[in-house]
Image: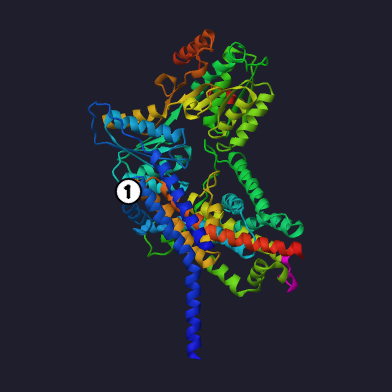
Amino acid sequence: MTESMHEMTIRRLLAIVRELAVPIVSVVIAMVIGSIIMLISGFDPVAAFSALLKGSFGGGRQIGETMLRATPLMFTGLAVAYGFRAGLFNIGAEGQLFMGGLSAAWLGIVLAGLPRPLNIVLMILAGAAIGAAWAFIPALLKARVGAHEVITTMMFTYIGRYIVSWLVTGPLKAPGQIPQTDVLPTESTLPKLHEVTAFLPISRAHLGFAIAVVLAMFVWWVLKYTSLGYESRAVGYNPWASETGGISVSATTVKALCISGALAGLAGVTEVMGVHLRLFDQFSPGFGFTGIAVALLAKNNPIGVIAAAILFGALSAGGGTMQLEAEVPQKVIFVIQALIIFLVAAEQIARWIIGRASREGVEHAG
Amino acid sequence: MDTKLRKVLALLLVFALVTVFAIGCAAEEEEPVDDGVEAPVSDVKAAMVTDVGGLGDKTFNDGTYEGLKRAERELGVEIRAIESSEIADYEPNIDQLANAGFDVIFTVGFLMTDTTIKKAPDYPDVAFGGIDQFFEEPPDNAVGLLFNEHEGAYLAGVVAGLGTLDQDLDDRINDDNVIAFIGGMDIPPVEKFEAGFIAGARSVNPDVEVVALYAGTFEDQAKGKELALSAIDQGADIVFAAAGLTGLGSITACQERGALFIGVDVDQYFSVPGSGDVMLTSAMKSLEVAVFETIKSVVDGTFVGGQNRFFGLADDGVGLAPFHEFEDAVSQEIRDAVEEARQNVLDGTVTVPPTRAEL
C-alpha cells in the first residue's frame, strides 16, 4: 500500500521532470550556442552572461525591470496557451492587446476624477471585454463556417492596429507634435509595486505583475478543475469525441477564443495603465507574438507561463547592461531568444501540426 | 538508426546556422582606420541610445552614430551606443549611461521625446541631445536637435520640377507635368519634406501637379510600391519618397514601371544597392553634423541646453546628394536653378514653408 503510493509519487515526479526537460534543455542549448557565437565574434560569453544576470536580477531595481517586462508576456502567453489547450492557435493576440490598450487609454480619460480602485477595476474589465470581443468574430466564424482562426485573428490584428494608428493620429491625439493620446490621470493608472507593498525596493514594476501571476494561477485552476476548462481541454484533445460525449464544440470554441482574447486584451490594458500611461502607435513591440513563444516554452501550462515570461523578461531587462558592460551587441540577445524559440518550437509545433493533421485525416475518412 | 541519422542531420543544421550567425555578427565589426595622424584625446564620454530600429537602420540611428564616430576621430572622445529593442528600454538605457559617467547622451527619434524630458532633470551634469525631438519646455541640460528638412526637400523639388519637363534628362520622362511625393506617416517631420518639395517644384514649374500619398507606416515596402505604382499611373515620372523602409518599395516600383526616384535622409545611392538606375538624387539631412557639433560644444565647454536647435542648409544640416549616374544627363539649367534656390534660401530671399498650410 505505502509502496504503491511511494511509486506513484515517484512516477508523478518523473512525469514533471519529463515535462520540464524540453524547455530547460532548449534554454541551455540556446545559451551554449549563443556563447559559441559570441566566442567566434570575439566577445566574452562569461562577461556577457554575468552582465545579463546583473542587469536582470542584480538588485531590486533590476528585478523590478524583469518583472515589468515579464508582465505583458505573461498575459499574452496565457492567452495563447489557453487557445492552444482548446486546439486553437490565437495568432492574433497582438490585435486584442491593441484593442485592450485602446480601451484603457480612452476610458482612463473618461473616468478621470473617480476613485482609483474603481477605475482600475472598470478599466481591467473593459479591456478584457474588448479583447474578448475582438476575438469573438473570428471565434464565431470558426464555429459557424470553419474559417481558420490563424487567418482571421491575424486579419483582425491588422484591423486593430490600424484603428489605433488612426485614432492616435486623429480623433484621440493629444495636442503637440507626437501622435499619441493624452496622459492618463493618476487615478486611472496602476500603482507601482513598491507603492502598494512597503517592503519592495523602488522600481518600475507595477501592480500588473501581481495581477498576471494571480490570473495565471486562476487560469490553471480553471483548466484543471472546472467544467469550462475540462470542455476546453477535451475539445483540444479530440473535438469529435467531445461532441459525441455531449460537449458543444462550437460553443466551447467560441468561449475558449474569447477567453484567450480577454487575456491578451489585459496585456494592452496593463501596459497603458502601468508603463506608458498613454497610447501610441508602437506601444507594443510585438508582445502578442512573443506570447506565442512564451506559451510554447511553457508547454501551454499556465504556471509554466509565469516562469517562461520571467525568462523572456530577464533577457530583455539584462540586454542594456550586457551591451554597456560586456560590449556585446543587443542582437546577440535576439539570437538567443530566437534559438530558444526555435528549439522549443521545433518539437512543439511539429507535435501540434501532427495532432491536427491526424484529426483532419479522421474527419475526411469519416 | 533513423533517429540517429536525424540527430546528426539536426546537429549539422545547427552548426550551419551558428556559422551563418557568426559570419553575420563578425561582418558588423569594423576595422579601425589608422591614418597615421596623432589621435587627439579628450576625457569627455559621449553615448547614444538608439530607438527600436537599432543600428543598421541606414537612417537616423546610423546617422547619429556617424556623428559619434567623427567625434571619436577628431576630438578623441570615448563613444558608446546602446540599442533599444523595445520602448521599455529607453529609460533604463539612459540610466545606465548616465550612471556610467557619460557626459553627453543622445536619444534618437521623436518617440523618445517624453523620456528625455523626464530623465534629463535626474542627471543635471549630463548634456542631453534629442535627435528629431522638439521640446516645448526644454530642460536646462537638454537640447532638441531638429532639421529644416523642408529646405533640402525644396532643392529636390527644384530638380523634380524642372526634370519632369526635360525629356533630354532621361527617356523615362513623359509628357505629363506630374511628379509624386510618397510619405511614411503624416507627422510634422514628414510633412516638412512634402511642403518643401512642392514649394521647390512650383518655384520653377508653377503648373506642376504633385501627387502626394501617405502610407501610414515607415515599414511596409509593399505599401510603398503600391502607392508609387498608383502615382506613376497618374502620370508621375519622378517620385520622391520620405518614408523609411516603405520608400524602398517605391524604388522597386520606379524600376519596374520606368520612373526616376529621389531618396531621403541619406544618399540612398549608396545605402540602397542596385538603385543607381533610378536614383536621381537624395534630400539628405546630416545628423552627423548636429551630433558632432553638440559633442564639440560639450568638449569646448560651450554647451547651452534649454533650447531647440534647427540645422538647415546654412550649417550643412540638410542638403542635396550628387546626381551619380545622372551626372552627365542633368542639364546646366537644372544645376543653375538648384544653385540659385540654395542662394535664395541662404540669404533669406525665399522662406521655405514647413507645412502644407503655408504653401
Q: Residue at x 48, y 75 (%)?
A: A14
Q: Residue at x 67, y 63 (%)?
A: A358
B174 or B7, which lies in front?
B7
Magenta segment: A242-249
Toward which corner of the image does residue B262 lie, by quadrant?
A: top right
Q: Position of residue B212 (x, y in %)?
A: 62, 26
Q: Position of residue B31 (x, y in %)?
A: 33, 34
| Secondary structure at numbered mark 1 | loop
Toward which corner of the image does residue B329 lie, by quadrant?
A: top right
Is the C terminus of chain A in the top left, top right, bottom left or bottom right quadrant?
bottom right
Q: Residue at x 65, y 68 (%)?
A: A237
Question: Is residue B301 among what the camera can see?
Answer: no
Q: Residue at x 51, y 61 (%)?
A: A297
Q: Which residue is mark 1?
A: A326
Left or right: where B127 falls relative to B339: left
B356 or A331, which lies in front?
A331
